Amino acid sequence: MKTQLSLLALMSLTIPALASAADAGRPAATKIDSGRYIVASDVPAEQSQILQKDLAFMYALNFRDDAALSQMMELDGNLNAASLDSWLSDRVQYIISENTDLDSAVAPVTQGYAFENPGVLPPLESIEGAPDISVQNASNTPTAGHGKAVMVMANVGAMIYGMGKEQNTLLGVNVPGAGTVLMSSPRTGVIQIGEGMFAPIFQRKGMSDTSTPLYSLSRLATLFHEARHSDGNGESTGFLHTICPLGHDYEGIAACDLSLNGAYTVGAMFERTITAACDKCSAAEKELAKLETLDSFNRVLKTGYKFDDAADYTYKCNKAAQMAANIGDEAMAFCKWLGQQKLETVTASNWDAAPEGQRLKK
Ligand SMILES: [Zn+2]
């Protein structure tokens, strides 16, 4: 999802509406998983119930040790449902609806807010496009056939945090039924979910029942992927994706990682582990889960360009050259210029996962 949130709109807002007053008489948010997660009141009840069931599904599994996953996630204690849930709830707190209009839900709270690592930001263009894996799933989703983007899930909290930091302004998000949530850190944990999250993405493989274990572990893997976007600091804040290069399955889309411990790796390693623990999964279900895991691992690049703009333009220029397309004099001149630049290539590495800022109590 490309957000509609515009910086200009934000700048022109004055005092945020007091959500508690605005919400008077409206339904409260739903708390699930013993109150660890707060689901906005406009999220359909069935979606909230499915998430609750997915988490219960996780608790019913017998996890085997996976030192690599435990180490990457820096899990407290043994790898089990409780430690995984604890990791998740440190990074995800609020779940908001795809219908949330961020332009009106986000408002400045404190101007001149003292952020950590002042002035050090990941590339903002990619903040807008990055916490978004809808493209991946949209292509698999029957209802998404003709290029219709289907919202799956996005870590909008990380994006809003970055926008606030760019303006030295603490932003608040009005979560229906829960009031104003302060974006003092990506760890505040605000995740937006949409119908794509609950779509029968394995239908073409003969698995259309979204209540089966396969779907639960796939949805959970998406949730753990998004949770990773709440980590990082300075330039690694949000563990942003990069543009996939020419020839990649997702070429031209910000659906790859240059971090070896980023969202695609965490999601894939988590899915591999939870699939191994799924004694109730059929062989066919495990096979499909493995394909999804591989798809995520394939998005972790070995090298790329440091800034998403460079990756994006390089992709577009290579594509134009490949197609021998007439891309116009101006664009051609730009591509020629780009080809002459010494773009900084980077080798994928482990990024610093320590979070920036702190979740504030309301
Ligand atoms: Zn992502």
Image: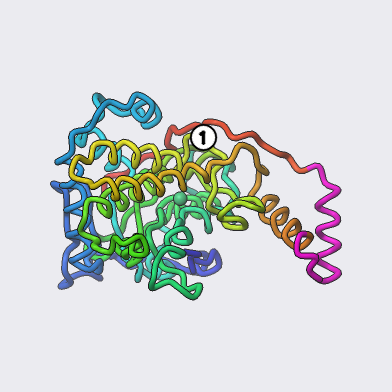
Quick check: is 360 in the magenta stretch? no
Q: Secondary structure at mark 1?
A: loop
Q: Which residues are magenta?
A: 322-342
Q: Quadrant of residue 20?
A: bottom left
Q: Quadrant of residue 275?
A: top left
Which residue appears at 21% of the width and 36% of the height? 81
State the colouring used for the structure image: rainbow
- Neighbor class of circle 1 (other Cα within 10 Å; few <14, some 14-19, many 20+) is some
Going by the image, does 220 lie left or right of 133? Answer: left
Up-down relation of residue 299 to residue 326 (above or below): above
Q: Main secondary structure of the magenta part?
A: helix
Going by the image, does 48 lie left or right of 171? Answer: left
* Coordinates of residue 115 in the picture (x, y in percent): 48, 42
Please state which amino acid type lies under the numbered disc 1. Leu
Which residue appears at 35% of the width and 28% of the height? 74
Which residue appears at 30% of the width and 45% of the height? 286
* Coordinates of residue 127 in the picture (x, y in percent): 53, 53
Quick check: is 329 in the magenta stretch? yes
Going by the image, does 291 lie left or right of 233? Answer: left
The residue tagged 1 is 260
Which residue appears at 17% of the width and 53% of the height? 53
* Coordinates of residue 174 in the picture (x, y in percent): 32, 63
Q: Is residue 185 visible?
A: no
* Coordinates of residue 259 in the picture (x, y in percent): 53, 37
